[in-house]
């Protein structure tokens, strides 16, 4: 038995015990085969080898000599030590990339996963639920975009504090057009991402989102959305002619869920290694380095060449991507929004706007404006102070 691993010895002892029960008549041979989990033909071969060579004949002779493809023990020890000392918390795919790029160790993902899970360094993943059919991607970039937020401890130096990552991803090639860490996902933070995409890329065809309250009105929990009552995001998309598609199950957002899962497995570790301790520095790292790495490694060519993005033209994006409040102008030409009183200055078009219904816009940069139809009646600071005329022109 010298040279055989202990598991092989234990299995051989079990096989011998079952064979002896079959020889004594306590078991039928087909029953013995079922107990050992082998076919009747394999059971006959084992019986013949036991008759010819006894106990030693039950050993697999191939187990006496290691496989020529076997990874050296020193390599296994180095991989486990690197994971414990330098890459604790990295997922398996991220760790494989680090081994290849920084240590010159080229091993398969499956091999590394098996070693890490066997050693207890990585927990096995839970089994998935029922089977779902894969949905075909859109053939052109700009045909359908996803936007969503993911709450996670993105910055290890600030843990256990969590932030929301707002991301806008293209369905055609998984390109990420916008990614920003914010305190909390909201109408304003999502609008900021959509406005940035429209300014840089142009208008797109459709947007796929979950049914959060800042995306849709849902009269009954879990029921269909009410598309006749638009949220501020829905109103902005309708003004631009962009279709807004609601998601009714997590599997429908599978690509976005996998996107966030991949980023959660890499971005915090990269931010930790870079010594980043603030949200501002983290967003700078994402824009300058991580988005470029994402495009090199996690995007794939679209099915067709070209793009579905079109220029926004003369659309006033500042007035569209903001929160609208309808108000009645008071007799003294003021508009009240919360604790702010916005004073409308004298206008050349009309001597007074008292009793007129106007639209008060809460802009993404913190400013406010009062609009009457296509006319802007005034700009105001975040506290409600009127902006001077020449400052308004500069803005």
Image (cartoon, rainbow, N blue to C red):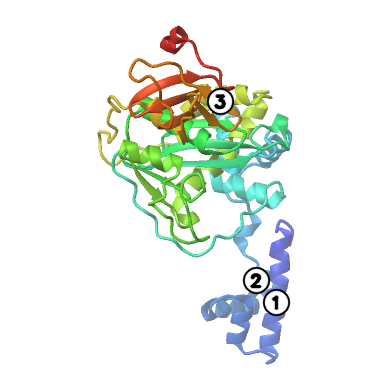
Q: For the view shown, which residue lies furthest in the bottom direction?
A: 25
Cα–Cα span, label 2 and label 3 = 92 Å
- The residue identified by callout 2 is 58
Relative height, residue 304 to residue 370 (above, below): below
Nearest the viewer among 126 and 164 is 164
**Residue at horizontal 55 percent and vertical 60 percent from the top:** 128
Cα–Cα span, label 3 and label 1 = 92 Å
Q: For the view shown, which residue lies furthest in the top direction?
A: 390
**Residue at horizontal 63 percent and vertical 26 percent from the top:** 279
**Residue at horizontal 59 percent and vertical 81 percent from the top:** 34
- The residue identified by callout 3 is 341
Q: Assess whether mark 1 and mark 2 are in contact (beta carbons under 8 angstroms).
A: yes
Horizontal and vertical percent for residue 98? 59, 32
**Label located before the other in sequence (2 or 3):** 2
Query: Which quadrant would the C terminus be assigned to in this image?
Result: top left
**Label located before the other in sequence (3 or 1):** 1
Horizontal and vertical percent for residue 30? 58, 86
Give the foreground label among 2 and 3.
3
Circle 2 Cα neighbour tier, 10 Å, few/some/many (<14 / 14–19 / ≥20): many
**Label located before the other in sequence (2 or 1):** 1
State whether residue 344 appears in this view.
yes
- The residue identified by callout 1 is 16
Circle 1 Cα neighbour tier, 10 Å, few/some/many (<14 / 14–19 / ≥20): some
Say what secondary structure mark 1 lies in.
helix
Nearest the viewer among 382 and 288 is 382
Horizontal and vertical percent for residue 172? 35, 41
Q: For the view shown, which residue lies furthest in the front direction?
A: 331
Say what secondary structure mark 3 lies in.
strand
Dividing the picture into quadrants, the one containing residue 95 is top right
């Amino acid at each position: 038995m010298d040279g055989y691993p202990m598991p092989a010895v234990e299995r051989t002892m079990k096989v011998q015990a079952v064979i002896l029960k079959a020889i004594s008549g306590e078991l039928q041979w087909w029953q013995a085969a079922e107990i050992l989990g082998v076919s009747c033909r394999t059971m006959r071969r084992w019986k013949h080898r036991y008759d010819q060579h006894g106990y030693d004949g039950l050993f697999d002779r191939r187990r006496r000599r290691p496989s020529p493809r076997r990874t050296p023990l020193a390599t296994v020890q180095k991989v486990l030590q690197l994971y414990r000392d330098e890459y604790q918390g990295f997922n398996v795919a991220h760790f494989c990339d680090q081994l290849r790029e920084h240590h010159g160790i080229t091993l398969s993902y499956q091999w590394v996963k098996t070693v890490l899970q066997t050693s207890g360094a990585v927990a096995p993943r839970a089994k998935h639920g029922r089977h779902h059919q894969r949905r075909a991607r859109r053939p052109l970039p700009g045909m359908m975009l996803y936007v969503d937020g993911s709450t996670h401890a993105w910055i290890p130096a600030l843990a256990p504090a969590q932030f929301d990552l707002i991301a806008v991803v293209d369905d055609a090639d998984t390109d990420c057009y916008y990614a920003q860490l914010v305190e909390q996902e909201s109408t304003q933070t999502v609008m900021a991402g959509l406005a940035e995409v429209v300014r840089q890329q142009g208008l797109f065809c459709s947007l796929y989102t979950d049914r959060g309250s800042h995306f849709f009105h849902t009269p009954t929990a879990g029921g269909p959305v009410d598309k006749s009552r638009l949220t501020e995001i829905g109103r902005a998309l309708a003004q631009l002619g962009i279709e807004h598609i609601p998601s009714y199950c997590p599997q429908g957002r599978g690509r976005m869920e996998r996107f966030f899962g991949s980023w959660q497995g890499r971005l915090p570790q990269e931010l930790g290694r870079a010594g980043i301790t603030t949200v501002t520095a983290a967003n700078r790292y994402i824009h300058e380095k991580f988005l470029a790495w994402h495009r090199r490694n996690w995007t794939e060519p679209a099915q067709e060449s070209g793009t579905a993005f079109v220029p926004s033209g003369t659309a006033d994006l500042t007035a569209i991507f903001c929160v609208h409040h309808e108000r009645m102008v008071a007799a003294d030409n003021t508009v009240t929004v919360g604790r702010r009183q916005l004073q409308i200055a004298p206008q050349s078009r009309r001597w007074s706007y008292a009793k007129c219904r106007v639209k008060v816009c809460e802009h993404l940069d913190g400013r406010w404006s009062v609009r009457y139809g296509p006319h802007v009646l005034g700009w105001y600071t975040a506290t409600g102070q009127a902006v001077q005329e020449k400052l308004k022109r500069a803005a």
